[in-house]
């Protein structure tokens, strides 16, 4: 599969993985991406998906240590929309807010596929896992980027303590099937 040349940090192997995982979601299923930036991973998800119930959650504010001024934040969000129109032919539903706030907008057990690639600090990854886990349907796919980052692995192990190792993409994406780790009812 040839993926669009959108700026970002995702390898072709990981883009292919996202494409294939998105293709498993049913026609009326729900896909959520936490952290979309300019849309490199979003485009791969859209290209593979049968559903158009795709949500992108991002603030486009940059990192906490170097936040963008408002005009730059708006520029990057508009660039994301433009990239999606041009390269994916579809603009997902955008939640221009934090992942914590966006989680409140989804019913429990409503999401078929969630891809986590937002703030990489250990506390925020932990809270993203905790806040979004209840939103996952049974047999849903919960995945994230940057497994090589120690913050990601540490937060993952705190939340999924019974899982020795998630499935890895061959690149830098981790994946777990819900409720393979033993989520309660």
Image (cartoon, rainbow, N blue to C red):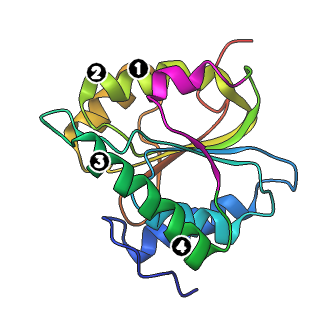
Q: Earlier in the sequence, mark 3 or mark 1?
A: 3
| Alpha carbons under labels 3 and 1: distance apart | 28 Å
Residue 136, label in figure: none
| Alpha carbons under labels 4 and 1: distance apart | 27 Å
- Residue furthest out toward the top: 185
Q: Crowdedness of circle 3 by 10 Å Cα count: few (<14), some, many (20+)? A: few
Q: Residues at badges 1 and 2 in contact (C-beta under 8 Å)?
A: yes
SS at mark 2? helix
Mark closer to the observer (4, 3): 3
Q: Which of marks 4 and 3 is nearer the N terminus?
A: 4
Q: Name the residue under label 1.
A: 127
Q: Residues at badges 3 and 2 in contact (C-beta under 8 Å)?
A: no
Measured from the top left, where is residue 42 in percent x and y?
A: 54, 60
| Alpha carbons under labels 3 and 2: distance apart | 28 Å
Q: Crowdedness of circle 4 by 10 Å Cα count: few (<14), some, many (20+)? A: many
Residue 123, label in figure: 2
| Alpha carbons under labels 4 and 3: distance apart | 33 Å
Q: Give the range drawn in magenta.
A: 92-106
SS at mark 3? helix
Q: Residues at badges 4 and 1 in contact (C-beta under 8 Å)?
A: no
Pick whichever, 103 or 96, lies toward us: 96
What residue lies at 38% left-to-right and 41% top-to-bottom? 118
Q: Crowdedness of circle 2 by 10 Å Cα count: few (<14), some, many (20+)? A: few
Q: Is residue 121 left or right of residue 37?
A: left
Q: Name the residue under label 4.
A: 16
Mark closer to the observer (3, 1): 3
Asked if residue 61 can be seen in this view, the reply is: yes
Q: Which of marks 3 and 2 is nearer the N terminus?
A: 3
| Alpha carbons under labels 4 and 2: distance apart | 29 Å
What residue lies at 51% left-to-right and 21% top-to-bottom? 101
Q: Name the residue under label 3.
A: 71
């Amino acid at each position: 599969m040839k993926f669009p040349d959108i700026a970002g940090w995702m390898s072709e192997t990981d883009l292919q993985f996202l494409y294939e995982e998105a293709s498993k979601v049913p026609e009326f299923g729900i896909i959520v991406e936490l952290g979309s930036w300019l849309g490199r991973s979003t485009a791969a998800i859209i290209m593979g998906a049968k559903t158009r119930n795709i949500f992108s959650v991002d603030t486009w504010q940059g990192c906490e240590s170097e936040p963008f001024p408002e005009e730059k934040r708006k520029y990057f969000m508009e660039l994301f929309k433009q990239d999606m129109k041009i390269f994916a032919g579809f603009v997902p539903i955008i939640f221009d807010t934090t992942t914590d706030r966006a989680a409140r907008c989804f019913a429990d057990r409503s999401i078929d596929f969630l891809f986590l690639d937002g703030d990489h600090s250990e506390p925020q990854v932990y809270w993203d896992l905790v806040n979004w886990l209840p939103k996952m349907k049974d047999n849903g796919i919960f995945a994230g980027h940057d497994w090589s980052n120690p913050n990601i692995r540490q937060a993952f192990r705190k939340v999924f303590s019974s899982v020795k190792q998630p499935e890895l993409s061959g690149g830098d994406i981790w994946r777990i099937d819900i409720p393979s780790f033993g989520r309660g009812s």
